Image: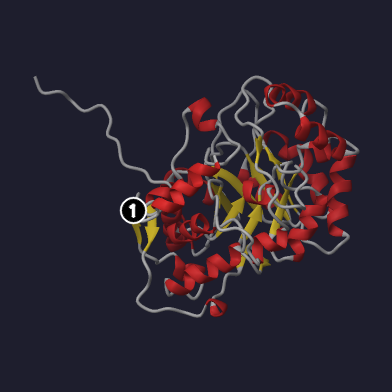
Amino acid sequence: MERSQHKTLRQAYGFDDVALVPGDITINPDQTDISFAVDKLNLSIPILASAMDGVVDVRFAIAMGKLGGLAVLNLEGVQARYDDPSIVLDKIANAPQQEVTALLQKIYSEPIKENLVGDRIRAIKKTGAVCAVSLTPANTKRLSPLAVEAGIDVLVVQSTVTTARHVSKSYKGLIFSELVKQLPVPVIVGNCVSYSACRKLMETGIHGLLVGVGPGAACTTREVLGVGVPQATAIMDCAAARDDYFKVSGRRVPIIADGGMRNGGDICKAFACGADAVMLGSIFAQTKEAPGKGNHWGMATPHEALPRGTRVKVGMKGTLEQTLFGPSSVTDGTQNLIGALRTAMGVCGARNIKEMHQTEVIIAPSIKTEGKFFQMMQGLAKC
């Protein structure tokens, strides 16, 4: 008997599976335009720092703003739960690995203090830096008015997976179309990985979208839940939704690749796949300005019943400025990210980010190993 087909599978690709093809013309890197805009907010570099407690605190947000990027402060993390978060951060950094999950669960059981929400935002704003904050959908209605009153410039509503329609027992959940009308600041929403979810979220009127489920260095969502799409494919699918939505609406909603980028090469691939900006965690956790002291953990890590992340020791390599603009003291591509992006755009013949989207991307799983025998042996010797 002929067997009917139940499901079909399509191939999906991550950054290690693809490579960029140089263009037919080349451009001087210093003549490339890498600016990024969300609604009326303009940034000189298209890089955001993840809303993770080991990455962003008030000090880091100010430093990132001065360098032209945007750091997102987690308003449900230790900064909004403890008067002196540095004490808590020291405990997390120094805890034995086998005890850290229970410690995180205990630390994040402390209630969010509404007065600290305003205090942290005002501390950033008084320096003149742009202030972006992150909330989960469950707390957005309660805390977003306080954040707006304190002076935020951008609100990021973020959870592991976000959709335009959510079914729950509550009478009326968070409705993005209503939220964007109520707030006087741009609203970025995340995270999603599919064409249809991306398109429906854009139709609610949001101003930006985070793309990525589970690729982060400290995230274990893919192992715990089995959910996720490799980033190269996820970005391409969401970029297609962005472009199709623009054709019918005339409104361009930027997509931000969130997670999975370990070096400049991955970042360049994210832009070629269609990202308008990138959000980085582990790379910034390695800077001297990061509050995690060389440690990195995800937003979902302290879940009381099902932790979906772990603390990872990433070490400290250099300053935030060195990471973004060099000079690089390492050869692994984790420093001078802006130099890498501009150079890649130059060799691909892209004058701006939109033209970088037109770069040819090929399937090339041997791109990092071909001809690299001695580098691979040297890397194994260090392990």
Give the image quarter of residue 190.
top right
| Residue 376 at x, y percent in the picture | 44, 48
Q: Is residue 2 left or right of residue 188?
A: left
Query: In percent of the image, x 82 and y 55: which residue is there?
Result: 151
Check disc 1 and report the residue beneath it.
Answer: 364
- Residue 166 in view in this figure: yes
Q: Nearer the viewer, residue 365 or 270?
A: 365
| Quarter residue 74 falls in | top right
Residue 73 at x, y = what percent? Answer: 75, 47
Residues 345 and 251: in front is 345
Q: Nearer the viewer, residue 286 or 11?
A: 286
The answer to whether residue 192 is seen in the rendering is: no
Q: Position of residue 52 (x, y in %)?
A: 70, 42
- Does 74 appear above or below 70? above
User: Judging from the image, what secondary structure is the residue with disc 1 in?
Assistant: loop
> Horizontally, is 133 left or right of 175 in the view?
right
Q: In the rendered view, does 301 fall on the left or right side of 17? A: right
Q: Residue at x 63, y 50 (%)?
A: 283
**Quarter the N terminus occupies:** top left
Where's residue 253, x and y in %? 54, 58
Most foreground residue, 60 or 294: 294
Residue 352 lies, with reference to residue 333, above or below; the image says below
Q: Residues within 10 Å of mark 1 (few under 14, many from 20)?
A: some
Furthest residue to the left?
A: 1
- How is colour applied across the structure in the image? secondary structure
Q: Amino acid at mark 1?
A: Ala
Quadrant into which the C terminus falls:
top right
